[in-house]
Image (cartoon, rainbow, N blue to C red):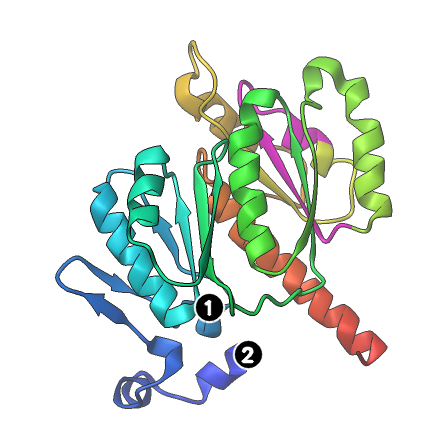
Amino acid sequence: MVASRDLVRFSNTQLSKRPSSLLAIEKLRDLARLDVGREVRKGLPEVILAEGKDAQEVAEIVEAMVKRTGRAIVSRANTNHLRKIRARRISNVRVKFFPKSGMIVIKRGSYEFRSSGGRVGLLTAGTSDIPIAEEARIIADEMGCETRGFYDVGVAGLHRLFKPLTKLLRWDADVILVIAGREGALPTVVAGLVDVPVIAVPTSHNYGFGDRGIAALAAMLQSCSLGLAVVNIDSGVGAGSIGALIANRAAKGRRGRTGA
């Protein structure tokens, strides 16, 4: 992991002259330019968005990513993307498909996974919000965090929230991701009760006047609870990424205090 102060030592000119894993790019024909140095530079993995892309091209990108880094993460994928990836017959890899979230994680057998010690909690208002929560959870998992989720605890039955929220606080979650559609009220409630950062994720699973997540997004942005940040509609990857960065920074602080 590269600390931000290490990057400050170089001017933009110096960086452009130094071939480095920090800025490594893997060019795949005229198809893609893979930021294979992102995880070293930012602590965030490159994520391949499958939505809107040809399945065969996604499979080619995955193979190039695995060969260079040992792992590829694909979001918004379907079974056709999965078939094309498996048809590449990339040697010595494990392919795991998460149909609920549309995530695919491909790893070489030799890929070394490192636990960070970060703790990311997840809550959803309803069961229709679970796919976005699972997208966020998988990203946080792949960034080394431990995750715990409790689903269908929205404000329509507010008494369902208290036990799961108590469990997350006793677990000492570093950050809590709250995923909700409809009127988007759950993140405001949670942020008013806890002393950890809350990331609100509006989902598009609603209908009527505030269709496709607009009402939930507006409500979360207008929240009167402090300590609450908001990502875009259905942005599970975005929420999981920033949540894991926060949790990993907190875990780093804990290790520093204990001398581990």
Residue 199 image offset from top left, x and y in percent: 60, 43
Viewer-side residue, 194 vs 144: 144
86 in magenta = no
Q: Earlier in the sequence, mark 1 or mark 2?
A: 2
Residue 60 image offset from top left, x and y in percent: 25, 55
Task: Give the label on residue 27, or none.
Answer: none
Q: Is residue 151 left or right of residue 182?
A: right
Distance from disc 1 to disc 2, alpha carbons, whole Å, reads 12 Å
Residue type (three-letter) at the residue carrying disc 1:
Glu
Residue denoted by label 2: 3
Task: Give the label on residue 39, or none.
Answer: 1
Residue 97 image offset from top left, x and y in percent: 47, 41
Viewer-side residue, 190 vs 39: 39
| Residue at figure coordinates x 74%, y 71% from the top left | 253
| Residue at figure coordinates x 76%, y 50% from the top left | 173
Residue 192 image offset from top left, x and y in percent: 74, 35
Residue depth check, mark 1 versus mark 2: number of the one nearer the observer: 1
Q: In this view, does 54 lie above or below 210?
A: below
Rate crowding at label 2 as few (under 14), some (14 to 19) or many (20 or more) other CA atoms within 10 Å: few
Tell me which corner region of the image, top left, top right, bottom left or bottom right, holds residue 234. top left
| Magenta residue span | 173-189
